[in-house]
Image (cartoon, rainbow, N blue to C red):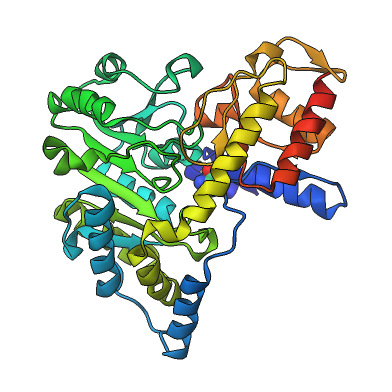
């Protein structure tokens, strides 16, 4: 019956992060001993002080529809957070709370992109950026980078990618999947290029801001000339181990926030009331309250770098944030391993799944076809076992 489906859905690629996670789950349910390093999801529990706020909200009978753009107390708390962590001044009417940062990004794309507009995606980029742009009938233009530049783009590359049709750039630091973090100086150099092209809007996805291992963080909107053109995206999933609670938000120029609210009002309305009440407590908490998770991620990153550094053919950058390693594995292309010819990163990722029972995500989904993504949001025991199995398959 798929010919009855719309062209829109038929041409939409499946999210590779979710597909790999689903595949890992399915194989596990068949009794296979799969280690899933596919999904980017903290393996911690949501902190008790946030859970208590949610329980209190239930007991206080928070059960009705919420304002489409979020409770005003939550929007005020988000403004205070932007001021505290990002040196950004927003007022509540510039904030829209959504069902995850993914919906925030989809809202922004829907309200700003027309068919034929071009969206710049510095690669590697998160898998859903390209799909979301395509859903708006926009054209996404990859700006490639490689491990040699720590997976960052240069101002010259940005300038060269811009055309009169360029409407947006989707920017993400700390980056999923590379873990790279742009410095203030690097931000300013990119902004200098964008200043010459006032028709371009910047979506700055800062969802991994708290998962950073000591770099100074910076926000695009903190550059004065960029403030009126930037939509800052963030959410609670990664910093507070709240992936399933689905709370994302934006700080944006008021006219964009208003448009996103209008869009959301026709599609999902205000997000879950209990999660929103708990989110007030979460965003107002000092980041130091969740530092124990960041410390543990850093420990695991170091373990992964040490272990994978000893695997011949794996080339690694040092991720400064997020919880992924993104090795360049192109050394294996053209080789036959366990009877399987490895032509590309997808073949390699499938080899690891089938022969080592380790689930990863192909770099092709992130616009980086020489790499695979491995999430280290898993226990140390699992990480050690995963690398051991990978080594055995490759030796
Ligand atoms: N952002 C996470 C990841 O990249 C969650 C999965 C998704 O929504 O793509 O794995």
- Indicate left or right for 275 with 376 as reference: left
Q: Choose between 334 and 237: the one closer to the eye.
A: 237
Q: Quadrant of residue 186?
A: top left
Mark yes or no: residue 148 visible.
Answer: yes
- Above or below: residue 144 compared with residue 253: above
Give the number of callouts: 0
Q: Which residue is drawn at 33% across and 62% down?
A: 97
Q: In which quarter of the image is residue 288?
A: bottom left
Q: Position of residue 248 (x, y in %)?
A: 39, 58
- Above or below: residue 96 compared with residue 54: above
Q: Where is residue 218 in the image (x, y as percent from the top left)?
A: 28, 39
Image quarter in which the C terminus is found: top right
Mark yes or no: residue 270 visible.
Answer: no
Q: Where is residue 220 in the image (x, y as percent from the top left)?
A: 24, 38
- Above or below: residue 340 compared with residue 382: above
Q: Which residue is drawn at 40% across and 53% down?
A: 101
Q: Quadrant of residue 166?
A: top left
């Amino acid at each position: 019956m798929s010919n009855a489906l719309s062209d829109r859905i038929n041409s939409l690629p499946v999210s590779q992060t979710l597909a790999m996670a689903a595949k890992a789950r399915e194989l596990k349910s068949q009794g296979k001993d799969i280690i899933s390093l596919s999904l980017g999801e903290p393996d911690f529990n949501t902190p008790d002080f946030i859970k208590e706020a949610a329980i209190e909200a239930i007991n206080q009978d928070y059960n009705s529809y919420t304002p489409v753009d979020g409770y005003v107390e939550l929007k005020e708390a988000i403004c205070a957070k932007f001021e505290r962590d990002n040196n950004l001044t927003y007022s509540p009417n510039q904030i829209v709370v959504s069902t995850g940062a993914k919906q925030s990004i989809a809202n922004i794309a829907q309200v700003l992109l027309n068919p034929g507009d071009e969206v710049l995606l510095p690669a590697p980029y998160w898998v859903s950026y390209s799909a979301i742009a395509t859903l708006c009938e926009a054209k996404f233009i990859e700006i490639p980078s490689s491990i040699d530049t720590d997976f960052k783009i240069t101002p010259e590359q940005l300038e060269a990618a811009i055309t009169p049709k360029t409407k947006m750039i989707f920017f993400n630091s700390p980056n999923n999947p590379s873990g790279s973090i742009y410095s203030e100086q690097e931000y300013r150099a990119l902004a200098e290029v964008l200043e010459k092209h006032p028709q371009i809007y910047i979506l700055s996805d800062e969802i991994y801001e708290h998962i950073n291992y000591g770099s100074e963080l910076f926000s695009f909107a903190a550059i004065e000339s960029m403030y009126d053109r930037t939509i800052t995206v963030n959410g609670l999933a990664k910093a507070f181990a709240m992936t399933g609670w689905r709370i994302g938000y934006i700080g944006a120029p008021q006219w964009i926030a208003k448009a996103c609210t209008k869009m959301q009002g026709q599609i999902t309305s205000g997000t879950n009331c209990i999660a929103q009440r708990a989110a007030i407590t979460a965003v107002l908490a000092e980041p130091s309250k969740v530092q124990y998770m960041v410390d543990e991620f850093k420990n695991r990153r170091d373990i992964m770098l040490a272990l994978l550094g000893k695997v011949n053919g794996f080339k690694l950058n040092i991720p400064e944030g997020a919880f992924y390693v993104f090795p360049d594995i192109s050394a294996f292309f053209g080789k036959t391993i366990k009877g399987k010819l490895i032509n590309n990163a997808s073949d390699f990722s499938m080899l690891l799944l089938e022969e080592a029972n380790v689930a990863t995500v192909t770099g092709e989904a992130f616009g980086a076809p020489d790499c695979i993504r491995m999430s280290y949001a898993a226990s140390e025991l699992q990480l050690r076992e995963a690398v051991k199995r990978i080594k055995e398959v490759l030796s």
